Amino acid sequence: MPTGAIVRTQFDTAADLAGLDASQRRLLQGPFRSVSVEVPVRMDDGRIEVYRGYRIQHSGARGPCKGGIRFHPEADEAEVLGLATTMTWKTALADVPFGGAKGGVQVDPRTLSQRELEGVTRSFTGRISLMLGPYRDVPAPDMGTNPQVMAWLLDEYSKRNGYSPAVVTGKPVALGGSLGREEATAQGVVYVMEAYAADEGLAIEGSRVVIQGFGNVGAHTGRLLHERGARVIAVTDVDGGLHNDQGLDIPRLFAHAYQQRKPVAEFVGGDAITNEALWRVPCDWLIPAALGGVISKDRNVNDIECGVVVEAANAPTTPIADKVLESRGVTVLPDFLVNAGGVIVSYFEWAQNLQQHPWTFERVNEELHRKITAAYRMVRDLRRERKAQWRTAAYAIALQRVAEAERLRGH
Ligand code: NAD
């Protein structure tokens, strides 16, 4: 099920809980502005290749639009709109002064040389630069993009508008990026897990963790959980991966797969495992940290044997699978709470850029902990009070905040 459809179904359930009327629902569902562009790039062999790109601003009611740029073959318009919509709920729930947006270019970055990747980034930035700005729309990295891509985006935008570090977050620290931003999403995932574990009397130390995706979010989450004494027993990336019930050697796997960018499956220290078999590994915490729609009724939900699904990826669980997990007593901690650490530290980065005053690593993590734990507690309390799912309670808080901002603006 595509991300867009997942996000729409979840919206309807939460809009009922939040008591939104028909016009509020219409206003909050569609995009504020949606742009589709051609992205022409001169390839290394001299040819011009033309990719399709999108920048969709879902809502700017609570502040400048905010959201990552994804380079992926499946980043079509519906996918990007679904992700932009999720960003609106994420920024509202985290209570950072942003709206929601997302960008995507339909390209597989693994097929590009570094020069071609730079070409795609500069061409796409040129096409959407009219929409961007520190007080309009502030991109960040997402799947298939990274701090280097953000550096090129900053350079391309600044050529037209003068030096503007606050136009993009997730930049390298040397160009005004924030300390702690690279691992911020994973750090937030772990803070939410710790808060939930404390409430439920669970321990992170000694628990069994399974992770799909070993990029920015998956690899740092694995590293931070390993540092807290968890046993990471199975990991996959796009090409499959490894399983070892004794626990994988995460520091060495981190160096191999994340820092040296080699396939997880080529690491020594476990049995080979496919992405399909990953879901059948019994564990305490199951952490999807790759694509949307990966946990579904047809594919795997009945095979899953875990205590908690921690949605580090965006929209990894289809609505039907969500219901099945709920009926089986499996808690699903929802994406736009769990992975909000990235946008929270992006907000800190933006604030540091505007103030031209960098923060220490410790301050970033302290404030991240405070903000994401506050969001977690609000969701937990509403969930208890209304006997709702975690996801529905999180949505209801976010929808009410955005609806209130729209109402005060006169919409
Ligand atoms: P990334 O590109 O750094 O890593 C993605 C990982 O997923 C890689 O290991 C890749 O091999 C794997 N993968 C890709 N396709 C796969 C497939 N079909 N099967 C199994 N594995 C596959 O991306 P990221 O930044 O870590 O983002 C991962 C997820 O987290 C996405 O859903 C993204 O939207 C979400 N997210 C990221 C951030 C952030 O700050 N990076 C913030 C919030 C949410």
Image: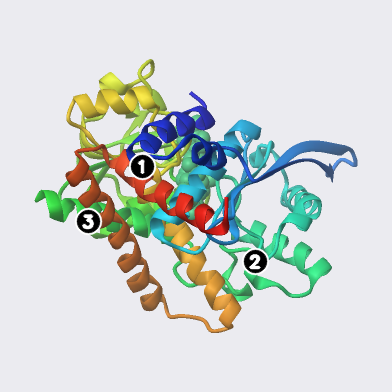
- Residue carrying label 3: 194
For the question of whether residue 258 can be seen, the reply is: no
3 or 2: mark nearer the eye: 2
Q: x%, y% of residue 211?
A: 34, 40
- Residue carrying label 2: 135
Q: Is residue 19 left or right of residue 377?
A: right
Q: Secondary structure at mark 3?
A: helix
Q: Secondary structure at mark 1?
A: helix
Q: Is residue 220 left or right of residue 248?
A: right
* CA distance separating discs 3 and 2: 34 Å
Three-letter code, disc 1: Ala
- Residue carrying label 1: 18
Which circle marks residue 166 in the picture? none
Q: Is residue 77 left or right of residue 155?
A: left
Q: Give the residue displayed 21% in from the left and 51% down from the top.
A: 381
Disc 2 to disc 1: CB gap under 8 Å: no
Mark sitting earlier along the chain (3/2): 2
Q: Give the residue displayed 24% in from the left and 38% down from the top.
A: 388
